[in-house]
């Protein structure tokens, strides 16, 4: 249950902020995308 509590906000943040980061900086977006994929796989 604790794991779900941590993952759910993380996935929500990834979905809502990824495009904003991508617009700001391509390099940052790539790093953030990798982080999101790692979080989803975890």
Image (cartoon, rainbow, N blue to C red):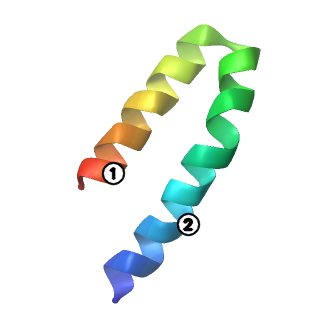
Hey, which residue is sitting farthest left in the picture?
42
User: Crowding at label 2, few (<14), some or many (≥20) Cα neighbours within 10 Å?
Assistant: few
Residue located at (33% from left, 77% from top) = 3
Name the residue: 50% across, 31% down. Answer: 32
Q: Quadrant of residue 35?
A: top left
Residue identifier under label 2? 9
Quick check: 19 above or below 12?
A: above
Report the side of 9 relative to 4 (left or right).
Answer: right
- Find the distance from the CA under tag 1 to the CA under tag 2: 12 Å
Residue 19: give x, y in percent of width and height: 68, 29
The numbered dot on residue 40 is 1
Residue 37 image point, x, y percent: 35, 39
Query: Residue 27 is drawn in which quadrant?
Result: top right
Residue 3 in the image: above or below residue 42: below
In the image, residue 36 lies at what x, y percent?
Answer: 42, 41
Q: Quadrant of the N terminus?
A: bottom left
Residue at 35% over, 50% down: 39
Is 6 placed left or right of 18 in the picture? left
Looking at the image, which residue is at 74% across and 30% down? 20
Label placed on residue 14: none
Q: First in sequence, mark 1 or 2: give its number.
A: 2
x, y percentage for residue 24? 75, 17
Q: Residues within 10 Å of mark 1 (few under 14, many from 20)?
A: few
Q: Quadrant of the C terminus?
A: bottom left
Vertically, is 32 above or below 40? above
Whether residue 23 sits left or right of residue 2 in the image: it is: right
Element type at mark 1 = helix
Secondary structure under the numbered disc 2 in the rendered image: helix
Count of marks placed on residues: 2
State the residue lying farthest toward the top.
26
């Amino acid at each position: 249950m604790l794991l779900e509590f941590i993952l759910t906000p993380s996935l929500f943040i990834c979905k809502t902020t990824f495009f904003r980061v991508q617009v700001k900086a391509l390099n940052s977006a790539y790093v953030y995308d990798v982080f999101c994929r790692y979080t989803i796989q975890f």
